[in-house]
Image: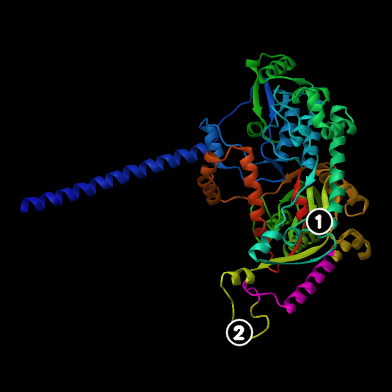
Amino acid sequence: MEILSRLTTFLKMAWKALTMVRNAFANLFFIAVLVFFLVAIFADTEETLESNSILVVNPAGTLVEETAPPEPAEAFLRKMGRETAKTDETKAQDVIDAIRRASTDSRIKAMVIDPRDMQGCDTTKLLDIGKAIRDFKETGKPVLAHAMFYSQGQYLLASYADSVSVNPLGGVLINGFGMYQTYLKGLMDKLRINFHVYRVGEYKTAAEPFMRDSMSYEAREQSREWLGGLWQAYLAELGKNRSVTAGDITSYVENIDSRLRETGGDAAQLAVSAKLVDAVRTGDQFDQFLAGKVGLKPENMNRVEFRDYLNMTTAQAPKGKELIGIIRARGAILPGKQPESMTGSESVAALFRKARQDPSIVAVVLRLDSPGGSAAASEEIHHEIARTQEAGKPVVVSMGSVAASGAYWIASGANRIVAAPTTLTGSIGIFAAFPTFENAAESLGVVSDGVGTTPLSDLGNPLRPISPQVEASIEHLLKFGYDLFISRVANGRRMAPEDVEKMAQGRVFLGQAAHQGKLVDQLGDLDEAVRTAGTLAGLTAVESKELRREHSAREKFMEAIFSSGQALFSPRSPALSRLMAMAQAQAGLLDTFADPGHIYARSLECEASSF
């Protein structure tokens, strides 16, 4: 027994020692991998641009005003030499900056437009990129476009090239613009959910998906107007780029079936005959064509993607002591601090404070790309503009693709408003919306009952019905909020309230019509807004810098950890990605209804459009 006891003790000690050694090795291995991971991400690597380089403009996903910080996992996998998942978003300004920088870079011999991974057709952002491409072409460097297939937005980008070619099995799909919302009233009725909607503004149709099972007359009327304006702008730009008429393109779209029958289903040859593309080429044939344009052999050409090119080159730092600060605000307007994909009232306020405290910033350009959102958050940002102006620094608003409802509430306080002709803006109106579930709960045998000290004691209980007293109170609140909105616009735009009312009632306008109605001061892009801000600040030479929220070391580290799985296992199917995006957008809509008073200045029609 004594021998057995000693043997047992020895085995226990040996097992404990083995466990300690195993844990030590596991921990050392984990630390080594973590250190390698962090070094691979954050270490500076020397990358040089070769002399015979071709800039590849290949935006992926949707074009946006501002993206979240780049994922460290993406950089890690690139440095490991692995193919990574395509990004879901591309900052339009990054594309513009790369093109402008490459136009004066002698190492860049040509530009290739490869739009295969770009999604959607954000006309305003594509026109801004197109302007940069036109400037690049003035240097004499060739610009060529090639793809397997062109969707509507991809083709608009490609149309700026000197020569457009398509794969033999490809083609060009132009289908026009449309707005198709998902209406949920039938689902709400089946689930017995009461979605309470109160609105001010005959054309304030933002809450229609929860109230109706079809588009209202008012929504249909105004949608036709601005969709038609966008379509005409699209046709005009293609006509300018490809020397075709609007009638030619309209005929191509509306008679696509008979046109394809004439070519035996050959979409590529149809695109050539319609003068939409110049040639049908395989990938190898395009490489030979490109090589001939730059006077090199295909194997001697060095293609560099615009993202990598930005990383390889350094932007010229502003030389002046007096600068224009640029603040970007994208997405639904929400209270508090929000990520870059949303417009948070505290997040934007912090950037305005940064601009006020920086002696080198003499004026601010607020770049808005938002359909609106929380009325309270919009009012907070409106006050930040006023504080900045009181500090002696003028504020100019530059409208992107959309700056409607709450975004216009914000913009109305600026010294000047600059919009693109294709910007969607206006939608001056507000609404309140929230669901209650008393009927749904009752169908499941759940009933909420009790007593309270006042008739409002059950306010906020989603299992209780809304009383007539509460409904009347909400209507009074909305009337006050609408009057405040009208007042803000009237004061900021120096218009009579009755004149503002004529442009209000929730109507949505394109920038051109908004300019005619005096809702904006001038038509132009971000560059024009920066020049205007410089003029207001009394500058003769205008330079600018972007103001962005600084991410902490902890945020960067957590991004590195949690972005890895997404970078490694992102879905590759375009159809699946689109379906998931639609479902996510619909499910996440209610998450953006975060105003503490449930009062919103938002235009859902502006973000439901199929561009």
Secondary-structure class at tag 2: loop
Q: Is residue 273 left or right of residue 466?
A: right
- The percent position of residue 37, horizontal first and vertical second, equals 47, 39
Please name whichever residue, 193 or 94, is drawn nearer the observer in this view of the structure: 193
Residue occupying the point 55% across, 33% down: 78
Q: Residue at x 52, y 47 (%)?
A: 562
Q: Secondary structure at mark 1?
A: helix
Is 202 above or below relative to 549?
Answer: below
Its colouring scheme is rainbow
Is residue 470 within the magenta segment? yes
Which comes before the other along the chain, label 2 or label 1? 1
Number of residues whose C-alpha sits closer than 10 Å to that of mark 2, classed few (under 14), some (14–19) or many (20 or more):
few
- Is residue 506 or residue 529 the one in the foreground? 506
- Give coordinates of residue 392: x percent, y percent: 81, 57
To which quarter of the image does residue 186 belong?
Answer: bottom right
- Position of 300 relative to 164 (above/below): above
Residue at which label 1 appears: 411
